[in-house]
Amino acid sequence: MVKIAEEYMDKMGIKNTPYIIVRHLDKNHPHCHIVFSRVDYNGEIIDTTTNFKRNKRVCRAITEHYGFQLGEDKLSVDPSKLRGKEKVRYQVAQNIRRAISAPDVHDWASFTAELYKYGITTEERISKNGRNNLYYHKGKYSFWSVKLHKDYSRKSIEKTIANAHPRIESTWLNPDGTVKPLSAFRGVRLTEQQQADYVAGKVVRLDGCSGPQSTVYIRFDREAMRPKTYSNNPETATHIINGNTPSLGLFNISQNPMSGEGYTNSGYDNETFQQFRASHPGMTYAEALRAWKVKKRGKHLSDPNTMDSGGPHL
């Protein structure tokens, strides 16, 4: 170890000056510390001691020459022994890697949300030459992405996430995961506000629909990754099935929302007109009576010859 330390001093150009070498065995890996005077025997300042690039080249050359194990990047360092900004730097770098590989992360928005759990926020700044620079903030410290890791720019992270979580072409979703607007449904054109509410995941009421139900409620279901329709507002109304089981009036939706096909009544034959009227306060008496009668006739849709075979019915 003394020989290697002396070789390091020589390659760094630290010569003609007093120094000591202290060997430590307090870690799993034997190592040494070198303490030397920056003023040599001639009274001259040794200015190569702050040459970090040269230090990196020398260390790598000695490591490869003697067959030592190269240290990995910041992701493998234990930051518990560090202090101040350097400790936070390593923590941020490691938490970014954890966030990238988190199972719930599938795009930039979910990535930044995952980072927030570690107390890390992001900021994008445009440089004078038009370059988009990404900064990570934790507490009072800020770190430029390229100083943490070469793959921690937004472009690199989005590419890594996309490769890890490939998106399947969806009828209902855009490639970026947002909900596709619905312009029309069962013969009813949605207003701009209704389209915006649908995209936002809100319940939308549609009147005058073709099919067994003239009034339906539609909402995009994030868990099922498709829209679902209801006979009553799922946020307020419930029904009694078989006398005692509360449930929402739910219909199955086909893969073509424009066709009006693929809807089967789940069968709420025990619902009285008073119950139906109470759950549809926006209807006039005549409209409610007509819709209730249509709904009651919907029980015949359970005939196997008229059921949609596109998937399970809820």
Image (cartoon, grey):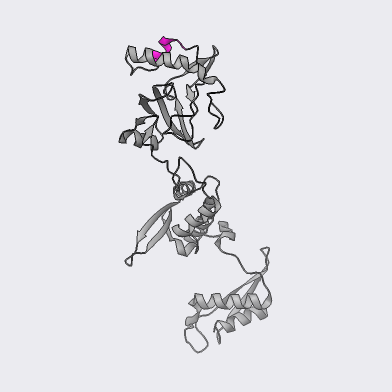
Q: Residue at x 41, y 59 (%)?
A: 134
Specify the principal SS of the magenta part.
helix
Magenta-highlighted residues = 271-278
Q: Residue at x 53, y 80 (%)?
A: 37
Q: From the viewer's side, name the closer residue of 258 and 145.
A: 258
Q: Quadrant of the C terminus?
A: top right
Q: From the viewer's side, name the closer residue of 261 and 238.
A: 261
Spot occupied by residue 107 in the image (x, y as percentages of width and height): 47, 49
The reply to whether residue 88 is in sight is: no
The reply to whether residue 9 is in sight is: yes
Q: From the viewer's side, name the closer residue of 144 and 4.
A: 144
Q: State whether residue 24 is above or below residue 176.
A: below
Outermost residue on the front side: it is 305
Spot occupied by residue 113 in the image (x, y as percentages of width and height): 46, 46
Would residue 306 be counted in the magenta stretch? no
Q: Quadrant of residue 201?
A: top left
Q: Quadrant of the N terminus?
A: bottom right
Spot occupied by residue 73 in the image (x, y as percentages of width and height): 56, 64
Q: State whether residue 121 is above or below residue 291.
A: below
Spot occupied by residue 23 in the image (x, y as percentages of width and height): 66, 72
Outermost residue on the bottom side: it is 42
Left or right: where does residue 55 sit relative to residue 273?
A: right
Q: From the viewer's side, name the closer residue of 83 and 142.
A: 142
Q: State whether residue 253 is above or below residue 99.
A: above
Q: Residue at x 38, y 14 (%)?
A: 290
Tag count: 0
